[in-house]
Image (cartoon, rainbow, N blue to C red):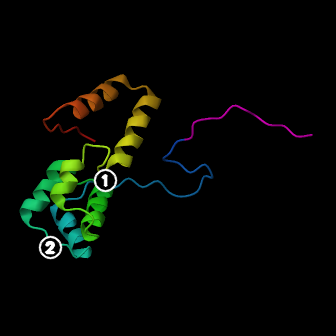
Amino acid sequence: MLAHVWDYTDLDINQSPFNIGIHLKLKEFNDSQINELAQEYKLKLEQDDLDKIKALIGGHPKLINLTFQHLSSQAETLDEIIEKAPTELGIYREFLRQHFSILRRDNNQELYQYFQDIINTQESKKMAS
């Protein structure tokens, strides 16, 4: 006898379905940590460049690393990355898409509205993490 269930559940993208791995939450990088990571990537960034990066993504470790990966591969300049950042062509698109789907799934209207405001504004907004 063979049984099959057609009810599929939504899996949490932040958790392994096989119960393996450890979930780590890193604090935002400070200026010296960002500088150190830039040196690891052998990037020659001016303080103005680092300020632009921090203004765009703060000290978010994953996004800082992603930015430095792209800069080190010389796929794009920092100005190109910044210009495309809020678009579907930007290097942060998957990160933003994941968070947007979490907002929809969790039905958190207040946070969803805040996210929509960020998307639709020309001014920068900062929210405590």
Q: Secondary structure at mark 2?
A: loop
What range is drawn magenta here?
Answer: 1-11
Q: Quadrant of residue 78?
A: bottom left
Residue 119, position in %: x, y?
Answer: 25, 34
Residue 23 falls within the magenta-colored stretch? no
Question: Label 2 is placed on what type of residue?
Answer: Lys
The first of marks 2 and 1 along the sequence is 2
Q: Residues within 10 Å of mark 2 (few under 14, many from 20)?
A: few
Q: Is residue 114 left or right of residue 6?
A: left
Q: Quadrant of residue 52?
A: bottom left
Residue 28, position in %: x, y?
Answer: 26, 54
Which residue occupies 16% across, 61% down?
A: 31
The quadrant in which the N terminus is found is top right
Name the residue carrying label 1: 91
User: What label does residue 44 carry, if any?
Assistant: 2
The quadrant in which the C terminus is found is top left
Of marks 2 and 1, the one in the foreground = 1
Q: Quadrant of residue 35?
A: bottom left
Main SS of the magenta part reads loop
Residue 43, position in %: x, y?
Answer: 19, 72
Distance from the alpha carbon under mark 2 to that under mark 1:
20 Å
